[in-house]
Image (cartoon, rainbow, N blue to C red):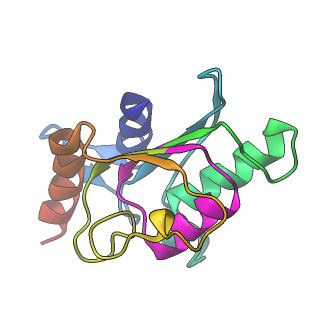
Amino acid sequence: MMRAALDAACASGTVDGSGAVSGADVPVGAVVFDADGRELSRAVNAREALGDPTAHAEVLALREAARVHGDGWRLAGATLAVTLEPCTMCAGALVLARVGRVVFGAWEPKTGAIGSLWDVVRDRRLTHRPEVRGGVLERECAEVLERFFHARR
C-alpha cells in the first residue's frame, strides 16, 4: 500500500536524473484501499496547482474514494496510505470519513497530527478512532521530500 502512495508522490512532478521531484506542490501521495485491498483512489498534493488550501493528497483521495465507494461519505473498513503523517485537517477528515486504518510513511514533527505534534485520531472523545501504523517505508518517503526541498534551496 505504501509503495502505491510512493508511486503517486513520485509521479506528482517531474523526476530528474538525481531522483529529485520538481513541481510547485510538495510531493505527498495518498491512496485509499477498500476492505478487500482494492484501490479506490489515489491523489497527490495539489494546493498550488488548484489554488485550494484544502487540496492535500489525503483530502483529495478521500473525496474520490467516497465518490466511487458506494456508501456515501462513509469509508468504513478502508485503509488510507499516505507518504507523510497527516496534518490536523487531514486527520480530522479521515476520522469523519470513518476510515478504518491509516498507514503513513514519514513522520512530520512540525505539523503531524497522528502522533508527532498532536494525536487527533486517537482522542478518546471521538466516536471513531482508526487503527494507525506510522513509519512504513519511512526513509524512502522522507527522501522524496528531502530531494524536493533540496532542489528548491
Residue 26, image quadrant: bottom left
Q: x%, y% of residue 138?
A: 21, 44
Q: x%, y% of residue 43?
A: 55, 48
Task: Answer whether residue 107 is magenta in the image.
Answer: no
Q: Is residue 55 visible?
A: yes
Q: Nearer the viewer, residue 139 or 113?
A: 113
Residue drawn where x is 56% and y is 57% of the image: 129
Determine whether 73 is above or below 37 in the image. Answer: below
**Number of marks in picture:** 0
Q: x%, y% of residue 18?
A: 12, 40
Task: Answer whether residue 98 is magenta in the image.
Answer: yes
Determine whether 124 is above or below 140 in the image. Answer: below
Side (left or right) of 64 relative to 57: right
Side (left or right) of 38 relative to 25: right
The quarter of the rendered structure image containing the N terminus is top left
Residue drawn where x is 62% and y is 50% of the image: 61
Q: Is residue 20 visible?
A: no
Determine whether 117 is above or below 140 in the image. Answer: below
Residue drawn where x is 16% and y is 37% of the image: 17
Specify the segment rendered in magenta: 81-101
The quarter of the rendered structure image containing the C terminus is bottom left
